[in-house]
Image (spheres, rainbow, N blue to C red):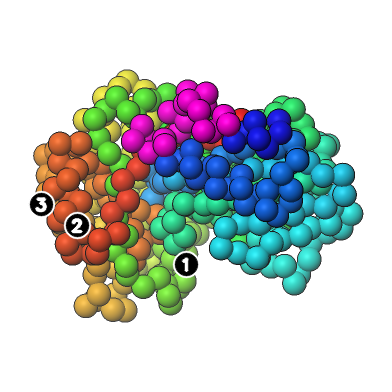
Amino acid sequence: MKMSILKKKFESDELNGILEKIYKSEDIENQKKRYIRVAEAFEELFGADREVNAFSAPGRTEVGGNHTDHNHGCVLAAGVDLDAIAVAGKNDENIVRVKSEGFEMDVVDLSELEVMPNERNQSASLIRGVCAEFKNRGYNIGGFDAATASDVISGSGLSSSAAFEVLLGTMLNHLYNDGKVSAVEIAQIAQFAENRYFGKPCGLMDQMACSVGGFVAIDFNDPSKPIINKVDFEFSSCNHALCIVDTGADHSDLTDEYAAVRGEMELVASKLGKKVLREVDREEFEKNISILRDSAGDRAVLRAMHFFNENDRVAKQADALKKGDFEAFKSLVIESGFSSYMYNQNVYTCKNPSSQAVSVALALCNDILKGKGAWRVHGGGFAGTIQAFVPLELLDEFKKKICAVFGEKSCYVLNIRPIGGAMIA
């Protein structure tokens, strides 16, 4: 459609139906203005007399399966209502131009789709990688221009990079493939781009949650062919808000801590003749705990206990949501959090025991939400963010007390978004 028509759609109530599925009702008018702002940026960059469409891809939150995927376990994740959006239109130059708010324009020539080492860790590599894998899989690609904006908070554990990758795939899907590429395949294409072109060896959880939307259960028993099941649950019906609390703790110098979690789990597996814990029989592990304490160490044994319990808990969480039993689900979230704290031990680093921002946030949640809500460490841990499911009647109190400790903008109130990457108009 012409740019003038697209803007009129956002200025009217014509798109309210789909916008209400993506954003909180009180945010819709501001979101319309946001899309119009991005449309005007496109006009300024690429001209007003263009055929264009609008697109969106959500960030994601890990709900269950803390530090299980790297040992081929199960994960429960969900798309959230913070998203990356774009206004985009085809061009006939075989070139992709993407201008993201706050960043320089990326320009990628589609006649050169091999990995460019000088693009490592840059967004241009993701554009090139997504286009290359679309072509590798036999889908159409072509030039397009896009203006984008994202409110997925970088460094929050909400996967801003995966949202951008899925946004790119969603644009190619609708601009050149009539929307026939599945959400699962778009996620796989996005992961390929991040692994091979961007240079980050990420798993598939982030991209899958962003692409599929809603609650998604993923089984990584065979990482090359993960089993993905969308969990039908209408989050808006449970009268809770999803809060992500940014504690402001420093993420730097934690690579060895994250690596040790995976390494110690795999050490236990190796002592039992396997590569990863998913291959280990739980009874065999339990019969050998005394020996494993000596050969692998107590922390490794505790982390293995966490893996087995957490892996089982994901299925229970998904089942509770399918049954509409949100109270059972919350109890399992709390169990997950305590397991991460006591067994997996990824809430603070022993290298700096005087700095325990995540521990403080979890303690506050326990005081405010005990018997009413649920809370747990979010993502990799050791620093960063926590997750809380807060009853709506306690939301104001929760925000006030949390922000008094961690700062005015530390608490992000989110909804679970039921749809993933999508063309909006």
The relative height of residue 179 versus residue 140 in the rendered view (above or below) is above
Reply yes or no: does residue 24 show up in magenta: yes
Q: Given this view, does label 3 or label 2 mark the residue nearer the observer?
A: 2
Residues packed near mark 1 inside 10 Å, few (<14), some (14 to 19) or many (20 plus): few
User: Dot 3, how many residues are within 10 Å of its Cα: few (below 14), some (14-19), or many (20+)?
Assistant: few
**Quadrant in which residue 372 is drawn:** top left
Is residue 275 rendered to the left or right of residue 169? Answer: left
Specify the label residue 65 is tagged with. none
What's under tag 3, amino acid-wise? Asp
Point 31% across, 46% down: residue: 413
In magenta, the rendered stretch is: 8-29
- Main SS class of the magenta portion in the image: helix
Quick one: SS at disc 2? helix
In magenta segment, residue 5: no
| Residue 98, percent from left and from top | 69, 54
Which sits earlier in the primary sequence, circle 3 or circle 2? 3
Closer to us: 51 or 80: 51
Q: Which residue is mark 1?
A: 259
Q: What residue sits 15% from the left and 41% below the top?
A: 394
Q: Amino acid at mark 2?
A: Ile
Per the image, the residue denoted by label 3 is 367
The Cα–Cα distance between marks 3 and 2, rounded to whole angstroms, is: 11 Å
| Real-space CA distance between mark 3 and mark 1, rounded to the nearest whole angstrom | 32 Å
The reply, left or right, for residue 130 in relation to residue 250 is right
- Sequence order check, earlier mark of 1 and 2: 1
Task: Name which residue type carries label 1.
Answer: Ala
